[in-house]
Amino acid sequence: MTDTTLAAIDVRGLTIRYGRQTVLQQLDLAVPAGALFALLGANGAGKSTLLRALAGIHPVRRGVIDLLGHDRARMPIAVQRQIAYVAEGQALPAARSVSELAVYLAPLYPAWDRSYSDQVLAAFHLPVHKPVGALSRGQRMKVSLWAALATRPKVLLMDEPFTGMEVAVKDELVRALIDVVSLVETTVLLCTHDLDEVEMLADWMALLVDGRITHAAPLESLRAAYAQRTGLERVPLKTLYLGLSRSETSPVEVLV
Amino acid sequence: MLPFLITLVAGESPYRQIVYAATRAIVAGTLAPGVSFPSVRELSMALKINPNTAHKVIAELVRDGLLEVQSGVGTVVTHGRTASEAERQAMLARPVEQVVVEAKRLGLTLDEVQDAMHRAWRDLSPGSDCE
């Protein structure tokens, strides 16, 4: 389904500097619509910066970001509302409870889906009357994700959603993501170090090394190409990630 | 709960693993004709796989003639279809030859291979106690 459809996210020549340090360098990346795309890379490779630029939090001075066919810089508000960003440690109004948050957020988003919101809340087992500030880290991540999902986003950007979570909570998140892709037809771009969680979930992956994408392809093709190159029978994501990170400083290699 | 046995192994294409497990269950009769096959959502939730993968699995099994789409019901296991002469010849050539090459390399006898083939054939036939 991803072959013929347009890219939901299309980044060309994105360069971002912090002072003298170049974090992203002439970065190109296309994420097909409907994909669950895992962005992998070492700490400091620029993953979070890329997601923040896509979310519109980080200003873009050099390069172009197209989301859902619109230039990020000149995007109508209606399109902006279809892009959701969920990050670890995201600021949430600590004094409000989840049910108060729902009352506050719903009118801001025309696409806010009340019944889907209730459905996600039930699946997440969130205490809806406790102040958000009193919730655990895993629960706060679920609050962020719930708020994002209730807006029925077309693009969901997630920065390290599984960090520091118990196994059971990770499992709930994985199930929520499956629902998002199958029911809502959302394109998901997530960066993570939790490779086991995305092993069976991701259908595309890209490797970000020193501010550049070195590999970007359907996971299946990368895995097959790597198996052929190394003679390995099985290529778990961890093996693929480590192998590709070590071997490549070469330009973009597309193995599709 | 899925109507066929599978434990996904990391590092191999989940798509191919599931297609194989389902095909195995169907030819063995564990999944009998007329039985409904899990939906995309059921399959992806049960195995925690990407729904796109689950979709591809079902499409492949439909293409292979093992499942058929019944409107209002979903997909069900078919009564099987007759393979074309080309498909039959292809099976009898390459995969069979590979078994023979591997058996000879390991010093197995034709009898041993035939016995193993008989056992596997019996175990994967409808009505056998396996699975």
Image (cartoon, coloured by chain):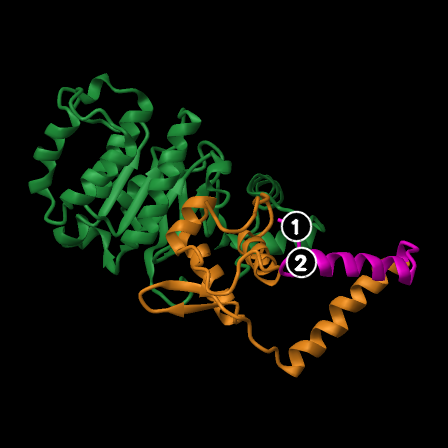
Q: Secondary structure at mark 1?
A: loop
Query: What amino acid is at disc 1?
Result: Cys
Q: Which residues are magenta?
A: B105-131
How busy is the neighbourhood of tag 2: few (under 14 within 10 Å), some, or many (20 plus)? many
Residue beneath the point at 21% across and 37% down: A147
What color is chain A drawn in? green
Judge left or right: residue B114 versus residue A107.
right
Q: How many marks?
A: 2
Q: Which residue is mark 1?
A: B130
x and y, in percent, of residue A13 in the image: 37, 53
Q: Which residue is mark 2?
A: B124
Towards the viewer: B87 or A104: B87
Mark 2 to mark 1: distance in Å? 7 Å
Query: What amino acid is at disc 2?
Result: Leu
x and y, in percent, of residue A231 in the image: 72, 51
x and y, in percent, of residue A37 in the image: 41, 49
